[in-house]
Image (spheres, rainbow, N blue to C red):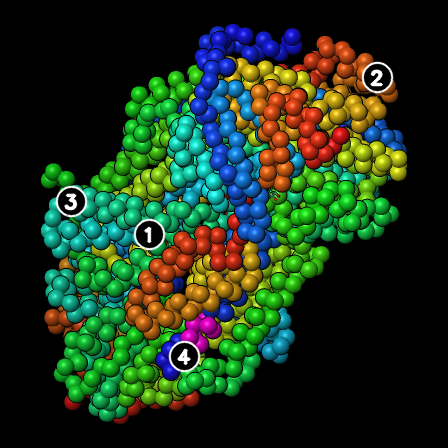
Amino acid sequence: AEPIRIGAILSTTGPGAGAGIPQRNGLQLAVKLVNEKGGIDGRPVQLVMEDDGSSPDVAVTKANNLIFSQKVQAIIGPTLTASTLAVGGVADPAKIPVMAFTGLGVPMEKTRRCVFHMLPSQDLNARALLEVATKALGAKKLGVLHDSAYGNIVMTKIREVSPDYPVEIVAVEKWEVGATDATTQAAKVKAAAPDAIAVIGNSATPFRNARQIRLTAPLLSALGTATYEYVKAMGDAADNIVFAEFLVAEDPLPSQTAFVDAFRKEYGVLPKTMEASAWDAFNAVAAGLAKVGPEAQPGALCEAIRGPFDGAMARFDFSQEDMTGLMLKSYVFSKLDKGKFVRLPFKAGS
Amino acid sequence: MLPNKTSLAPPGIAGELPAQRLRTARPSAATLSVLAFGAGLYLILPLVLERHAVDLLVFCGLYAIAGAGVGFLLGQGGIVNLGQAAFYGIGGYASAYCSARLNWPAPAGIAIGIVLSMAIAALIGRPILRLSGYFLALATLALGIICTNIYFEADFITGGTLGVPGVPKLAIGGFVFDTPERYYYLVWPIAFAIILAMHNLMGSRIGLALQAMRDAPDAAMVMAIDNARLKLWIFMLSSGLGALSGSLFAHYVGFVNVDSFGVDKSILFLLVPVIGGASVPAGAIIGALFIGLVPELLSALGDIHRVLFGLALVASVVFFPDGLWGLGRGLIELTRRRSGAADRGETMP
Amino acid sequence: MLFTQALLAGVTNGFVYALVGLGIAVIFKGSHVINAMQGELAVVGAATAVFAADIWGLSLWLAVVAGALTGMAIAILVELGPIRALFARRAREESFLLLTVGLGFTFSAGVLYLFGREEHLLPPLGDEVYEVFGAIIREHALWVIAISAALILALRLFYRHTHLGLSMMAASIDPDGAATTGINVRAMRTATFALGGLLAALAGLLVAPLIGVGYQMGPLLTLKGFAAAILGGLSNPLGALVGGLVIGILEAMSIVFVSSGMKDAVALTLLIVIMIFVPDGILGRAGRKGG
Amino acid sequence: MLSVKGLCAGYGALTILKGIDLGIGKGEVVGLVGANGAGKTTLVRTLAGLLPARDGEIRLGGKDITRIPPHLRSGFGLAVVLENRNLFGELTVRENLALAERAGRGRRRVFTLERIVDLFPAVGEKLYVRCDLLSGGQQQQVAIGRALLLQPDIMLMDEPSTGLAPKVVKDILDVLGRLRADGMSIILVEQNIAIASSATSRAYVMAIGRVAHEIGEGDWPRFMADEKLVSAYLGHHQGAAHQ
Amino acid sequence: MTLAPRIAPDAPEAPLLELKAIAHRFGGFQVLHDVSFTAPPVGITGLMGPNGSGKTTLFNIISGFLTPTSGAVLFDGRDIRAESVRRRSLDGLVRTFQTPKIFERLTVAENVMVGAFKSGRSGFFAGLAGLPSVRREMSDMRAQAYETAQRFDLGAVFDRPSPLLTAGQRRLLELARAYQGRPRLLMLDEPSSGLTTTEIEVLIAKLRLLADEGIAILLVSHDMELMGVAQAIHVLNFGRIIASGTMAVVQEDTAVREAYLGV
Ligand SMILES: Nc1ncnc2c1ncn2[C@@H]1O[C@H](COP(=O)(O)OP(=O)(O)OP(=O)(O)O)[C@@H](O)[C@H]1O
Ligand SMILES: Nc1ncnc2c1ncn2[C@@H]1O[C@H](COP(=O)(O)OP(=O)(O)OP(=O)(O)O)[C@@H](O)[C@H]1O
Ligand SMILES: [Mg+2]
Ligand SMILES: [Mg+2]
């Protein structure tokens, strides 16, 4: 039978590749398994994979290609927030669902009824960090080190929601994406004597720098750096870092074991949140396609996806305002112990 | 009396002026037919190509506009500009802010971007254009990075990392340029007009002065050429083109953010004329096509495509010394020589 | 404490920039080519060492030697191939720039393709951590400083006091004059690239324990090295050090006294101001003006 | 000493030298004159190896050096003072000279740094000054000194008197005279026939890439007296004749 | 001669150029000490001296590339020390260089046309627009350049790329270009080097012709024959004027003979 074409725009090169490559692995596995089970409606799935090189203008070009030349039914990705905004501008009018690996939660997303989010909004990420900082670590004074891209967005939200928590933000320092050194920033945060420090961004460098200048306060981090690669690049700085994420494959939740096993069987290593979210993204599209069939009217697939979906990463509800439906209690917290992620008993949002 | 004294003829009764061989000399029939063919090809391309290909060509056009500015600085002024993305960004943000946030008509945003860019170029150019060679290149590089930094920080205008979404499509007199095809027919004529204007300038007194300034600045000064002012002018011209390209980019993609205005873009804009050949303005067109299309063609080959793109750059410089434009001209010359066409009045034996 | 810590960080970074800038200066001195792939060569050197140790199981020292030789060998090949072709044709400056930018792309993509996208750390030369006025500096940073300083001193002596060093400079300043003075111009250029490649690899190997090198890091290193070399006067090894320190310290101080968000804006504005006041670079010397 | 047969050379598609034949014996100072564009510099550059010979043969001291690369020719006893001086501008005078001294090491030592400083006092004053700060004449002196330090058997000098004060020219001519007495051969490209005639015993007159006329031993006065001959070979429009 | 001098050479005139106690120092090296002389608005003034005596430095000071450590440069009675090279050129002060500075990427024709840059009118925007007036201006400039090129025996190589010129032709080209800049004072730094004896004779005739046209010339040369065209000669030695006068006078001066002529 004629294959169903699904597009993907991932940042497999450039600064976003830390997330883009795991996403690619999760996605390819999901496609493979669906095809092994006979595809959707008896038709195999053909994945058209594109790399946007972490640049939004390239992402738009690729989206144009996928939608108008390749005639895909849905787009998995992009990896980065800015690319999501850019691609949404092309895909939404064409009523092609976009399963973005970013969480926006900005009001304008209300108008884009076909752009779904596989990861929590930054508002939620900010709250998850503050929850664990205040409730699990008991921090009264929080320092923040963040990068100029993803970290910057989260930081904006931390500022907004921090009044809800009994914590004072005592130092905020920034490093630019790709920086080779953030020692001075770390020193400036250290000088403010915080009880805990949130390090938000896609780089192992600041973690190392913080430990190198003997910053002993607990470090917290978000999704972006919760991967084995980053942990390896952190070197001996990697212990006792707390992550707010969704999947600890060493100790998965019952709803996650099937995915973890399949992944380990395929690749021989453990997956993290990014792999799981890509797996979910494809499966959500596949579920929608199974409902409306591959020949449906434009927009029907979006409608079909717009509902609850039980994924390996977490439970989604794409009919929510933020087009993701993730909640604080969906988070899983982990701590690094000798390079291994250990799931913490702490639950947020309770 | 020495026999040679006869050559000291007073002015006025000199021998006949050799046939014109100015840079603006009338094109030959061969050139004209090539041009006509090119124009035809240009017009029908969108009809035969897929939308995606047209989309790529629109980006090529944008690169050509911004790259032409950098190329003119390099080829005519000997100035390596590693900061064009700064002006590209000014154009992009001016358009995005004016039309998406303030709901002003698109031409207003474009004009503001260009004027602002040229004003900034005038202001900053005065001190930094006193530098020369690689020192100037470093200053432009620094300028580019400073601007990127500011784009990150000034998020009340630029939206920071998130950028400005929802930039409306460009509409002129009710006609909306909302498809790649329509944009293609808008962007490329602009690029051609710019190249033509540059070509004109090269054939003028100012163009000669530019070349003179580049080859021997001291001697140019003695000929009363105001090197500083010339440099400032072409720097402003280049900046204005960067802004124009950025504005067109913003309206085309409908979204701008800092990622589009980084140092890598500046390097790309420099590569455009260098690959195409910086000695002729039209080199920017060829360079833009190369930069815009080759990575896309190679990306079909999988992960190795970036290595291949690097090698393609290397090959282009090793095998085509004057840029791809030089290759084209070489071929034309060759066919001409073959067909025994009349020589061009050059005195080279 | 904060000030001292920032100063130490600035100085350490300054030496890192200087190390890359040193190679750029050496290659410029000996060939008048701006080598825009210096950072990538550093990455290649470090990545090779990491892989020689991790995958081929070489001992650390052998791996480091392998990394250094790889950097040197690649630079030599680049000189023997495309660079020589361009020289034979008397290509313009921008052709060399494009060539090295293209090669930089290629090497960075090659590292990505062959070695993956991880950042690689090498073990440091020493694990101690020292405290200076309440601030902390790692032993390896001190080694970087000491080794770079020694390299710079050695290069200075090499260029001013050895026949080979003088010949390398002479060959690039005036190839015809050099050839008629019994200097093998091509061999000198090859030697220059060998030295530049070796310095690049050394830079990569020395900084890998501090910052962890990855395929995407080349351009950044090149840019900072380029800035350091130019600020110092372009063809002067000592200048590259001064340039690197100025940039490193400016950056650190902008973070302390202004804000980390405006670091680049502040540091680079100051850099432009410095250049305007010393238009030939801090240690550069101007030629004759006029006739 | 040096013999050239049927030498052809040029640039790109252009052939400038169209079969040059000449010969210089040991201890001879031979002039090479000719109008602008006659090809004198091209000949010097070809003899020096900077421009490949397209045809013909260059023999030096009996050995064929036509295909020897330029930097090895000093080892055969050949030294050149190029038209543009070609000094290493960013290096000091001393460094310029030291490089040549080193290259001349394997040969019989006739010149030392001290002797050069003696010959050209201006050089001595500026030993530690960068060459590109020197005046034009000072640079010319350094260039000649540099060539001498290669300890050559034969010197090619392309217009060495350019830009030199008359006194220095006289001194150089004196030196050349002494060198010749020491057995050194010299080819002197010289536009100024007064200088050429007083410095050389015989000369080749070049025109349009060929040796068009030979001024034999003792023929200088006759040549100079013949205005027609002089203006025919040294007059103006020769440069255009290549077309 | 075909042209009558515009101004009679013997008319008493205020000097066109006047140097007052010029001194210059490079770092610790004092090149010029207290140099004063004048050049009349008509005729040829010579400047000679041993290598390194400071002639070119003096040229750089007069043309504006260097600012003297002390002393004044008066042009037309006005102190021009603060003026740029360009401003001085517009006033009619045009020089050539000891090593010819040719615009290598231009043809001979274009090089000469650049000489007439200052008399052109068209601006940047007119150039971009490619107005017909610009084209006309360019062809006029070219025609004028051709006349000048012929005067300086460059007619036959008019459309050659300038790198192909021989040393002698480069000298002539620089001269032609400077002439095209309508100089009132033409400063020539060793214009004869690279020329044959015959060519120097022609050059002498050309300089006379230029002088007859009313162009004042300041000439630096080591060629005694060429120097013979100068009505007054000043001899520099170690940055000081050691003799002034006609050729015959300075040639007999013992200091000059010892320092410069070596006889
Ligand atoms: N690099 C070059 N490329 C092409 N042609 C050249 C080149 N250099 C010189 N020529 C041409 O070669 C011819 C001979 O030049 P050459 O310099 O040998 O003359 P010359 O006798 O030394 O003259 P001069 O007395 O002016 O120094 C000239 O016609 C010149 O135009
Ligand atoms: N920029 C400079 N820095 C240091 N010294 C300089 C500089 N320019 C010139 N000099 C020195 O000043 C002196 C005068 O130089 P200048 O070029 O004026 O001499 P000149 O009279 O033109 O000699 P020539 O006849 O050889 O051309 C020389 O000793 C020269 O080395
Ligand atoms: Mg010559
Ligand atoms: Mg001089």
Residue D34 visible in the snapshot:
yes
Between circles 1 and 2, the one closer to the viewer is 2
Label 3 packing within 10 angstroms: few (<14), some (14-19), many (20+): few
SS label for mark 1: helix
Q: Disc 1 marks which residue?
A: B85
Q: In this orientation, which residue lies closer to the viewer: D108 or B304? A: D108
Q: Disc 2 marks which residue?
A: D219
State the image quarter where residue D12 is shown: top right
Query: Is the residue indicated by label 1 positioned so its CB lies within 8 Å of ligand 2?
Result: no
Q: Disc 4 marks which residue?
A: C4
**Looking at the image, how many numbered discs can be counted on the residues?**
4
Whole-angstrom CA distance, mark 2 to mark 4, is 84 Å
Whole-angstrom CA distance, mark 1 to mark 4, is 36 Å
Q: Disc 3 marks which residue?
A: B108
SS label for mark 3: helix
Between circles 3 and 2, the one closer to the viewer is 2
Q: Which residues are magenta?
A: C7-13
Whole-angstrom CA distance, mark 1 to mark 2, is 71 Å
**Predominant secondary structure, magenta span:** helix
